[in-house]
């Protein structure tokens, strides 16, 4: 199941009044592949935490992809 099936992004796609642009997560290392498949990117390329990585997802990219369908 992908991220878009788990989160209802419609609040961000139509008349966005939330003030949100990014989703950030502090992902466990074992979950990095899940987030990478769902277009999350490293917030800090040189992050060397031994347990987690800071990742972000740009909601504008999601909106652009959704509206181009």
Image (cartoon, rainbow, N blue to C red):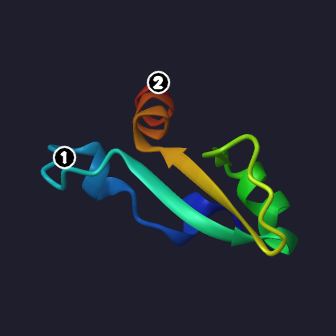
Residue lying at 51% horizontally and 31% vertically, measured from the top left: 65
Residue lying at 46% horizontally and 56% vertically, measured from the top left: 23
Q: Helix, strand, or loop for circle 1? A: loop
Dot 2 crowding, Cα within 10 Å, few <14, some 14–19, many 20+: few
Q: Which quadrant of the structure image shows residue 1?
A: bottom right
Q: Is residue 62 found left or right of 12 in the rendered image?
A: right
Q: Is residue 58 found left or right of 29 in the rendered image?
A: left
Residue with the mark numbered 2 = 68
64 relative to 2, above or below: above
Q: Helix, strand, or loop for circle 2? A: loop
Looking at the image, is mark 2 or mark 1 earlier in the sequence? 1
Residue with the mark numbered 1 = 16
The one nearer the camera, 48 or 67, is 48
Judge depth for marks 2 and 1 and give the one in front: 1
Residue 56 at x, y = what percent?
A: 56, 50
Q: Is residue 50 found left or right of 14 in the rendered image?
A: right
The one nearer the camera, 50 or 9, is 50
Residue lying at 65% horizontally and 44% vertically, measured from the top left: 44
Residue 19 at x, y = what percent?
A: 19, 50
Residue lying at 80% horizontally and 61% vertically, measured from the top left: 32
Dot 1 crowding, Cα within 10 Å, few <14, some 14–19, many 20+: few
């Amino acid at each position: 199941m992908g991220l878009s099936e788990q989160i209802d992004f419609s609040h961000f796609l139509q008349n966005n009044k939330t003030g949100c642009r990014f989703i950030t997560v502090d992902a466990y290392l074992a979950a990095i592949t899940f987030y990478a498949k769902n277009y999350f990117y490293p917030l800090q390329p040189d992050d060397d935490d031994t347990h987690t990585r800071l990742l972000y997802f740009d909601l504008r990219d999601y909106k652009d992809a959704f509206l181009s369908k």
